[in-house]
Image: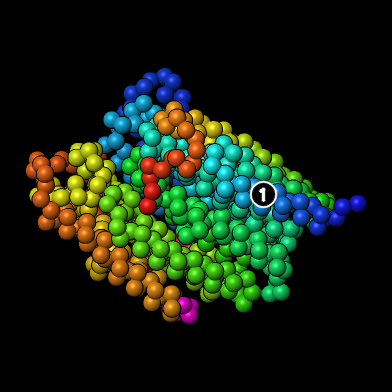
Amino acid sequence: MNWMYILPEIIIAASALAIIIADLISRKPVIITTIAIVGIAASLIAACTSTVTFEPVFDGMLFIDGWSRLLKVLLLVVAGSVVIASTDYHARLKHSWAEFHALVLFSLLGMMLMPSAGNLISAFIAIEITSISFFVMVGMLKTPLSSEASLKMMLTGGIAAAVMLYGMAFIFGSTGSTSLAEIALSSQPDFSSGLLLGALLLLAGLLFEAGAVPFHMWLPDAYEGAPTPVTMYLSAGSKLAGIAVIARVFSMGLNNPGGLGADWGMAVAVISALTMTLGNVLALQQSNIKRLLAYSGIVHTGYMLIAVATIGLGGQVSGDEKLFFYMASFALAEIAVFTAVIVITRQIGSDRIEDLAGLARRSPLLFAIMSIGIFSLMGLPLTAGFMAKLFIFTSAVDNGLLWLMIIAVLNTVISAYYYLRIIRVMWLGKPSDGSALSLPKAPGLISIFSALGILLLGIAPYLLLKLAENIIFIP
Amino acid sequence: MPGLEHYLILSGLLFCIGLAGAVIKRSAIVILMCIEIMLTGVNIAMVAFSRFITPVELTGQIFTVFIIVVAAAEIAIGLAIILALYRNRNTIDTQKIDLLKW
């Protein structure tokens, strides 16, 4: 057994434990933050330099291939941004500062294992590590809103986990194995109806973490009630890990062109159409910025599921570089927007959209960062979001999903209404109090870097796309 | 001698009873118990498949042990969250917990 394959995960687990021990010795917040950042940086180096292999490791429990390595690097960057941005949230989280950081790392551990899962058992364990850590983080403020958000997320998550496990039981019963590689061998074109039932139940359960339609109800409540750094982590981290685990489990285990792959590919395509339409309709009349961003996240889940559907219909065996590009550009936009939201809401003491009025005058820099992030979420040209949408929509057409592409384009047009409303309020609105807003150093650095990243990927998308292609398909 | 289908009918019944209860019931603790009933249904299906489909390997039984462990962790967290909510709101009735909607 070669432990070097999971060195990044080992470093993250060790630093989470180190934070818990350090909290017993000294309660200085700077020590906790330093341990978290050093741990994430060390793990990032390990993940970038680690060896990858197309063979499953640890008796088929994990795949350490290019797809999982790319996702690991992306999730580490997101977690590092969350830790740095949360320094601006210290006043409200100071009683559970160490617990918060330990849970950020524990859920990161689960999220890093999710795209690597090579067995239904390891997929289940990784998903539960992530979601149980998030239940606690969402309820961390212990206010009525935060506890309610946590309860709703926990009950929905419990039901989704049970549905997912029932699906896994049927897949195991029809194929006699829980290893994805062995399931793939036994899913012949004349698959049994038990396997199809299992695959659909499993898909329904996995959609919880991604926040797609049958299990999307927890998402706006959790986003609004949770501490804002946790909201940022939920949208830029666990959502991507949820999509990645769907892509992994279904493309590795249940892909058989003409057989099961076309079936679940079409099911994912229909869910994707429902997800983006419903998310858009409900987003139109939101007045809370965090809640609006939750619905916008649901819409983006719909767009990412288009890419998952094309993996099923196109019969690819591993992840997809276009899906990764979309994930990276979405994560950058969410980091920029949420870091700005954390800084702004702390200073104006409200997260209603009309209270953002006059931001352009109160802080031009924060306004610029928010605008770049929102334009990228909307998909305007010259931002990464535009190129990401373009790649995904063209690959949908290539795989015979023209109808889905039309629905997605219409939804993009509708979404411009509520994105531009935020910009209008920030630009033209009259502030009730005209004092200038400041941007502290650490969150400022993160948000400026991600805004620059969005513009860079919008102008030169092939930098990342070619890199992802090389890493995924060449060992 | 009961066969595989008898166990599967039992597990399906338990799963559906749990799911119906989780959707209908109002008390958060009863919903948690209903989720446990659903997981019991899953465990029975898992062990029955393991016994009848792969009699020499223990994959299903091992999976069941993992499910029991994770379910215990989830219940511990769930009760803590319900307690935190009760301290804030003095109720665990999910119909009355409605600060966040639409």
Decide if residue B57 is on the left or right side of residue A179. Answer: right
Question: Quadrant where the N terminus of chain A lies?
Answer: top right
Q: Residue furthest top?
A: A25
Residue A265 colored in magenta in the image? no
Q: Nearer the viewer, residue A260 or A77?
A: A260
Q: Which residues are magenta?
A: A395-401
Q: Can I make out residue A128 in this image?
A: no
Binning the other alpha carbons within 10 Å of mark 1 as few (below 14), some (14 to 19) or many (20 upward) gives some
To which residue does mark 1 refer?
Answer: B17
Measuring 11% from the left and 56% from the top, which residue is drawn there? A428
Residue A396 colored in magenta in the image? yes
- Please provide percent x and percent y for residue A440: 20, 39
- Please provide percent x and percent y for residue A57: 62, 52
Give the mark count: 1
Measuring 15% from the left and 50% from the top, which residue is drawn there? A357
Decide if residue A293 is on the left or right side of residue A368. Answer: right
Q: Nearer the viewer, residue A32 or A424?
A: A424
- Please provide percent x and percent y for residue A62: 59, 52
- On the image, which quarter does residue A421 sit in? bottom left
Measuring 52% from the left and 48% from the top, which residue is drawn there? A156
